[in-house]
Amino acid sequence: MTNFNIPYRDRGTILAVERERLLQYSLWSQASRRPDLPQNRTLVTLTLEPLGEMTRLSIHHEGFQSESEYKHANFFLTVAPSVIKKLLEP
């Protein structure tokens, strides 16, 4: 049986912000099982693009050191947009 109550930690450093347009940060994930050093971080870029009455959110995540790290992050990126949408909608 899987225990989902295990403490988990990610850390990031904000690298760029453009209000209502861009957020970019470096990300260290405990799941990588590597020390939190600059060379062990990935780069996450979120951009917002107005489309008439709607807004497009694009998420770009790069700099993985292994296929397993990519797969782990990709799983969470499939869930993140719907969670973000629920948080932002009135």
Image (cartoon, rainbow, N blue to C red):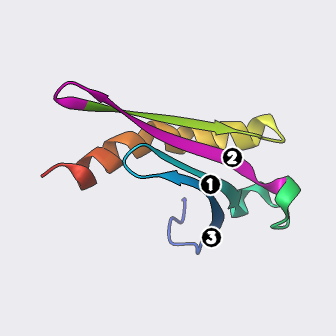
Residue at 65% from the left image edge and 64% from the top image edge: 13
**37 or 2: which is nearer to us?**
37
- Image check: 71 left or right of 64? left
- Residue tagged 3: 9
Q: What is the crowding at mark 1: few (fewer than 14 residues within 10 Å), some, or many (at least 20)?
A: some
Residue at 73% from the left image edge and 43% from the top image edge: 69
- Image check: 50 left or right of 81? left
Element type at marker 3? loop
Q: Are marks 2 and 1 in contact (CB under 8 Å)?
A: yes
The mark nearer the N terminus, 2 or 3, is: 3
* Outermost residue to the top: 52
Is 31 a magenta residue?
Answer: no
- Image check: 32 left or right of 23? right
Q: What is the crowding at mark 3: few (fewer than 14 residues within 10 Å), some, or many (at least 20)?
A: few
How much space separates mark 2 and mark 1, taking CA atoms? 6 Å
Write down the quadrant of residue 45 in the picture.
Answer: top right
How much space separates mark 3 and mark 1, taking CA atoms? 16 Å
- Residue tagged 2: 43
The mark nearer the N terminus, 2 or 1, is: 1
Picture coordinates of residue 19 (x, y %)? 41, 52
Element type at marker 1? strand
Q: Amino acid at mark 1?
A: Tyr
The mark nearer the N terminus, 3 or 1, is: 3
**Dominant secondary-structure state across the stretch colored magenta:** strand
Picture coordinates of residue 32 (x, y %)? 77, 55
Q: Which residues are magenta?
A: 40-54
Q: Quick check: 32 above or below 21?
A: below
Q: What is the crowding at mark 2: few (fewer than 14 residues within 10 Å), some, or many (at least 20)?
A: some
- Residue tagged 1: 25
